[in-house]
Image: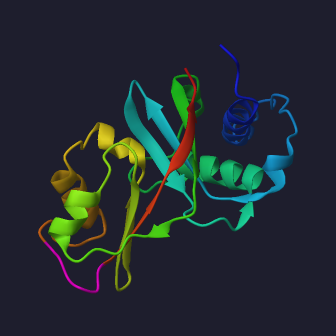
């Protein structure tokens, strides 16, 4: 099976960024031109298949390598849902990097239209209403496969009621390329 040089590099960048906080010697990363291009990523950390941290960027505002490194550190030490990662946890923590496509407007007539047009397993979704904003990566479909449940949980994440709908609610969708440590 061929290796994916970009994915290997991104996973190493993420692990190196976290490990450097603990004084670990970084592993050599293959230098690729893509690493200098602006990109948006999310870094997800898991332990025994359970979420341990997830932080990312929805818009490409910094070079890919820097975005991954900073999101990895934030996922490990700044995700408010979890205590900071300890050095003892590092070895059993698995890293996943998601490289996002630019979000595209997803205009819908109403919630029924949104539910009918969502593509489970494919669409990442950004929900915005006023100052409230939340996103789910396409990977979230694995635990929330029903579009109604997916959208309801996304609204809750944004601090809105699960049954909320308003004509000023804005949706955007995006895709990802993802790589995960085994």
Q: Nearer the viewer, residue 100 or 74?
A: 100
Which residues, given as a range, are shown in magenta?
A: 164-169
Which residue does the image show at 19% across and 46% down from the upper left? Answer: 146
Is residue 176 found left or right of 146 in the rendered image? Answer: right
Image quadrant for the C terminus?
top right
Predominant SS along the magenta part: loop
Q: Is residue 4 above or below residue 159?
A: above
Q: How is the image coloured?
A: rainbow
Q: Is residue 118 above or below residue 47?
A: below
Q: Looking at the picture, does residue 179 appear above or below residue 176? A: above
Residue 3 horizontal side relative to residue 120, left or right: right
Q: Position of residue 131 (x, y in %)?
A: 38, 83
Whether residue 36 appears in magenta in the rendering, the answer is no
Residue 95 relative to residue 21: left or right: left
Q: Name the side, left or right, on which 168 lies relative to 77.
A: left
Quadrant containing the N terminus is top right
Between 103 and 57, the residue placed more toward the observer is 103
> Residue 157: x and y, percent?
29, 62
**In the image as oriented, which residue stretches furthest toward the left?**
163
Residue 149 percent coordinates (x, y): 17, 52
The residue drawn where x is 40% and y is 24% is: 48
Where is residue 173 drawn, in percent x and y? 42, 62
Q: Dividing the picture into quarters, in which one does residue 66 lie?
A: bottom right
Residue farthest to the top, as pictured: 1
Q: Judge by depth and name the residue closer to the eye, 116 or 99.
A: 116
Say how many tags the image has: 0
């Amino acid at each position: 099976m061929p290796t994916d040089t970009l994915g290997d590099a991104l996973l190493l960048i993420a692990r190196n960024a976290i490990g450097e906080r603990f004084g670990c010697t970084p592993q050599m990363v293959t230098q690729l031109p893509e690493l200098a291009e602006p990109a948006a990523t999310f870094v997800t950390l898991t332990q025994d298949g359970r979420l341990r941290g997830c932080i990312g960027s929805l818009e490409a505002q910094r070079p890919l390598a820097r975005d991954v490194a900073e999101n990895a550190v934030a996922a490990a030490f700044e995700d408010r849902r979890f205590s900071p990662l300890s050095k003892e946890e590092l070895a059993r923590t698995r890293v996943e990097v998601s490289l996002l496509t630019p979000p595209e407007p997803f205009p819908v007539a109403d919630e029924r239209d949104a539910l009918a047009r969502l593509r489970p397993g494919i669409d990442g979704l950004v929900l915005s209403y006023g100052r409230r904003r939340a996103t789910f990566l396409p990977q979230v479909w694995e635990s929330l496969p029903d579009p109604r449940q997916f959208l309801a949980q996304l609204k809750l994440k944004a601090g809105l009621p699960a049954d909320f709908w308003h004509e000023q609610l804005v949706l955007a969708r995006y895709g990802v390329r993802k790589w995960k440590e085994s």
